[in-house]
Image: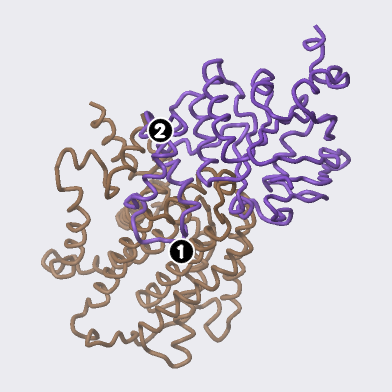
Amino acid sequence: MQDGAQHAASSAPDGAPVGVRARFPGLARRLPWLVLALLAAFPLIAPAFGLEYYVGFVRRVLIVAIAATSLNFILGYGGMAALGHAGFIGVGAYTVVALVEAGHSSAWLAWGGAAAVAGLAAAAIGAVSLRTRGVYFIMITLAFAQMLYYLAVSLRTYGGDDGYGLYTPLEMGAGLDGVHPQVFYWVVLAIAALVFALFSRVAHSRYGHALRGIRDNETRMVALGYPVYGLKLAGFVVAGAVAGLAGGLLASHNAFVSPSLMHWTQSALLLVMVMLGGAGRRWGAPLGVALWLTLEEVLKLHTDYWHWPLGLLLLLVVFHAPQGVAALFERRAGREAAR
Amino acid sequence: MSLFRAEGLVKRFGGLLATDHVELAVEAGEIHALIGPNGAGKSTLVNLISGLLPADAGRIVLDGVELTRLAPHQRSRHGLARCFQITSVFRNDSVRDNLMLAVQAHAGSSFRCLARRDAEQALQQRAEALARRTGLAEVLERNAGTLPHGVQKRLDVALALASRPKLLLLDEPMAGMGPEDSVQMVALIRSLASEAGILLIEHDMDAVFELADRISVLVYGRVLTSGDAAHVKGHPEVQAVYLGTEAGA
């Protein structure tokens, strides 16, 4: 049953859940655009409902979703359970700090630099880590990320443990600065949409198919003639660079960077969010991030013990939707298609 | 000169000499069968040749190219392909997707990451041609994991064929098969010999005697003897260690 549902979903032309399409023809194709339009309009309509505070919240969700989407790419499609992804977020954030400290103020330079430096770090870390498999890969990526963490702690120039405040916002240029207080929100939204669209596209390319082949049966892929190590490394570097970009954006978002960004618990949290949403599923990462952060936000309003219900939620997902929330929709879709 | 030669291959696992200075040759168009009792080192030898295990000593040459130091995927590029004793296909994908993946590996770069793969007509046609040739055309859209064992075995061979190999290593293609499936597999293997040399590891003696041009017997990691079916059947040591009473009766 489940296999059938997976298959039906993966063979749908644009990867949208089949059942949604069956019930509301055209909706599945339009849904991403609808979500994008809603998100784009949110800063304009939020004040009318007294929700200004949540514009910043949604911006954070979008930034974390960028990082989670890149993790989903290597975890869900590539089968690489990296437990050090927050390390690359941190490298990106500290690249912004370093550039600001050096007197640069261009946002694009800072964010581009964040992606580039994180990509380089991912190349170095991936080149070593990808020689291992399974638990060893998890442990070695964790170890590298912790090394980056302690490196950041030891950097006195950038505030060490106390972190580093970015007091003047980066300049985006092109007449974007100061047009509207929420320009940064739309820039983040545009980048998130672009990243999501690109990864969705790659999933159906030759490279995407090869990556999933490696996840499902690496030995066979080697025997078929695939340069498995190179293919994995390429994915790891791209994912690291995109996480670095998210880190750069997060630095701007918080106007503050500290080593806690790349603590291993952040890497674990990112993994949890991806698996909650559905690893290896197109909508897995954004769904998981939105669900987790929203619940956290709501629960914090009502109780100091907000970890409890989140833990219960995780248990629920483990037992009732081990493939993630995104899979729930697809499974229902499969059941309807079978009727 | 032979299409394929293995010279002085050695593999040790600690104190165990799993492959003991093995010499093997396969001519173009030849089916060379490798038989031997359990634990004789047949699978180790296949893994040495395909590169999944590094050899401790010896040389492997295919069509004039030395493969000994090459990684498995590079050996595949030089014309070596294998199937697996324990069926190794992509169980959650359709037969079509399985074949597409195999065809894609040897037709252009797999680092291409923007164009939709399934829109590549050339790949689709090659996958479909491969399916017809291996009798899988009827089950193209089925999930590989849901197919009967014999059909999955055929898919395993089809995946190996996608690279248009010069040498095909078949590691027990008939393992666990019923008689009907075996007949189909024998016919398929025979049809492949025209385009590739075949090294066939098999326990099914009927199939081996029916297919093989030459048979080598592996015992304790060493090649005991090599020759045609009559030679092997009549060899006293082979009867003793392998064919046992069955051949004596």
Which chain's colour is purple?
A: B
The residue that disc 2 covers is: B143
Position of residue B92 measured from the top left corner of the image (x, y, whole percent): 44, 37
Rendering quarter of residue B216? top right
Name above or below for residue B9 compared with residue B220: below
- Disc 1 element: helix
Taking the spot 30% from the left edge, 66% from the top edge, the residue there is: A194
Q: Which mark is residue A239?
A: 1
Query: Marks 2 and 1: in contact by CB < 8 Å?
Result: no
Query: What is the total number of numbered labels drawn onto the structure image?
Result: 2
Taking the spot 62% from the left edge, 69% from the top edge, the residue there is: A147
User: Identity of the amino acid at label 2?
Assistant: Asn
Position of residue B189 measured from the top left corner of the image (x, y, whole percent): 57, 30
Alpha carbon separation for disc pair 1 and 2: 30 Å
Q: Nearer the viewer, residue B16 or B170?
A: B170
Name above or below for residue B107 compared with residue B193: below
Taking the spot 57% from the left edge, 65% from the top edge, the residue there is: A145
